[in-house]
Amino acid sequence: MQLTRRAALAAGALTLAGCGAEPQAQTPSPSPSAAPSASPSPSPRPGEIVHGPRDRAQVALTFHGQGEDQLVRTTLAVLAQLDAPVTVLAVGSWLDEHPASARAILDGGHELGNHTYSHADISSLPTAAQYAEITRCADVLRRLTGSAGRWFRPSQTPRASAALQRQAQRAGYPTCLAYDVDSLDYTDPGPAAVVRTTLDGVHNGSIVSLHLGHPGTVEALPELIAALRKRGLTPVTATTLLT
């Protein structure tokens, strides 16, 4: 039996409602042949993020994670005094040697992510070895904290290739965390240079690259964070900036 036109329209509205679409108004369409347009799907998060929203007065300070134990503890103590949460992308082999650091980072209100297991030049490795570097670090993070963390940052390269992004996604990290401001603190230029280089490049939504294990970085933190706040920029974790 054929449906009347009114019954067919009603059946179509019920079908859309059952799929999660907004119910359509029950007034006739000015063009009977035109089908209701579907709502656009939200854009997926890109495979790599370089910075956060430029309309948000926040900055994510991110640390490449490995260093001498006492210096790391000092860094965390300074950050606690400054009430500045950060994101630490940890090297898995370093966490194996300093397992208490994982909990100390999280207990300090910071977040912990994956920076490969051995800090190799990951871009030069074959695909299987790239995947192993990521998953081995993820396993260490799970063992020590119960979570593999939200973010992956490749080692010895500022950007992840499309192929490396695929390996990260396969390992459970949908998004690689890059940065738009490189403090160059790993060159040990002195605390004043670390502050100057960072402030020269920072904007709303910036993700800043810093390193554990460098005394000049620790010395730079009070002046750097004070200067960011003077500009109206609040230091936050990467997750806070990006969600």
Image (cartoon, helix red, strand yellow):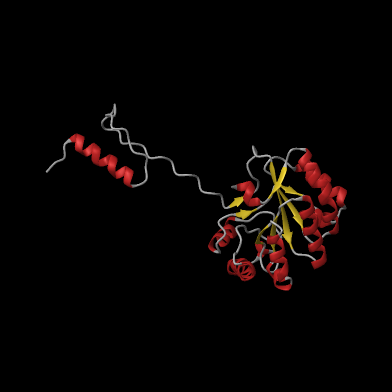
Q: Is residue 78 left or right of residue 133?
A: right
x 71%, y 43%: residue? 234
Image coordinates for residue 21, horizontal then vertical, percent? 37, 42
Residue located farthest toward the left when viewing the structure as drawn: 1
Please identify the quarter of the rendering in which residue 93 is found.
bottom right
Give the residue furthest to the top. 30
Q: Residue at x 77, y 59 (%)?
A: 76
Q: Quadrant of residue 88?
A: bottom right
Asked if 97 appears above or below 227 in the picture, the reply is: below
Nearest the viewer among 17 and 137 is 17
Q: Quadrant of residue 151?
A: bottom right
Residue drawn 85% across the image and 58% down it: 215
Q: Which is more toward the observer, 184 or 41?
A: 41
Q: Position of residue 224 (x, y in %)?
A: 81, 46
Quick one: quadrant of the N terminus? top left
* Residue 72 percent across, percent down from the top left: 79, 63
Drawn side of residue 160 relative to residue 188, left or right: left
* Residue 15 sits above or below residue 74 on the image: above
Residue 20, x across and y down, in percent: 37, 45
Q: Is residue 108 visible?
A: yes
**Left or right of 207 in this view: 224:** right
Residue at 81 percent of width and 54 percent of height: 185
Residue 120 visible in this rendered orientation of the protein? no
